[in-house]
Amino acid sequence: MGSVQRAMRLLECVADHAHGAPAKQLARETGLALPTAYHLLRTLVHEGYLRRDKGLFFLGDAAERLGSSGAQQKRRSTVVEALAGWRDAIGVPVYYAVYRDGEIDVMCVSDTPGNPAVEEWADFRETAHAHAIGLCLLSQLDEDARRDHLDRYPVQSITPYTVCDDHALLRRLERTRRMEPVIERQEYALGTVCAAIPITLGTTAATMAISLPAHQADRLVSAAQQLQCEVGRLLGSLAISISI
């Protein structure tokens, strides 16, 4: 345990020196005997956590990967906490999704036993035309990207309320106003209504969405507007985090 602690102190010390530091300086700043510092530094270099260049020590690839992984986990935790907060404040399940590499990708869902998320009974990626998440993401794409998606995933009847064909869907998407919530009523799942709001992430299409039982449909628009206000207040601090 002592060796691990000393090695961690060395790693932290090296991280504080963006332009590298020699062994003697690292030993002095960590309070380690020089022979001990040399031994641990050589081990850390061998394992890839440090690299040595012209007598100076820098963080190695293994340490960078650890840092990147930790940062990614922290960003994801930020998103999870935000969704849980909105879930509790509004009293609805909250979803976060992006359109990435030509596919719908639901990144995070926050629900409770009392307010469960919609069951994915038909593949979300193949039914973007039928649910609010997909409709919101498709509305943010250009015409070529939309047609490419529909060529791969043709419109199909999911429920009696689903849009009936490509032309009707494209007209609907064209009428969608920028930054307005996209509403869907029982088009993906009978007994469920949904709303999605567009999120601006540079060139990435993204959305936050909510769902409600159909008998609470009168709450849908106001709940979506509340979510939009909540997201708007935090979007600046979440802009990096929600790109996970």
Image: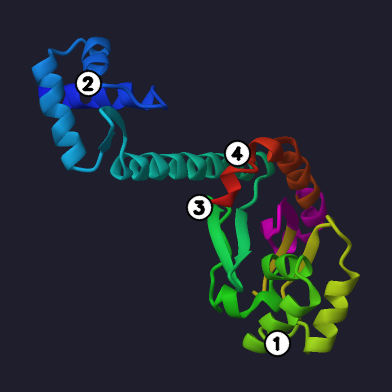
Labels 3 and 4 touching (C-beta < 8 A): no
Question: Which residue is under mark 2?
Answer: 23
**Element type at marker 4?**
helix
The stretch in magenta equals: 197-223
Disc nearer the start of the sequence (3/4): 4
Instruction: Report the amino acid beneath label 2.
Output: Ala
Residue 17 or 213: which is nearer the viewer?
17
Question: Which residue is under mark 3?
Answer: 113
Question: Which residue is under mark 1?
Answer: 155
Q: Going 28% across and 29% down the picture, which residue do you hit? A: 57
Disc nearer the start of the sequence (3/1): 3
The Cα atoms of the two marked residues, 3 and 4, are separated by 16 Å
The Cα atoms of the two marked residues, 1 and 2, are separated by 65 Å
The Cα atoms of the two marked residues, 3 and 1, are separated by 32 Å
Q: Which mark, residue 58?
A: none
Instruction: Report the amino acid beneath label 1.
Output: Val
Question: Which residue is under mark 4?
Answer: 85
Q: Is residue 173 magenta?
A: no
Among the 4 quarters of the image, the one containing residue 232:
top right
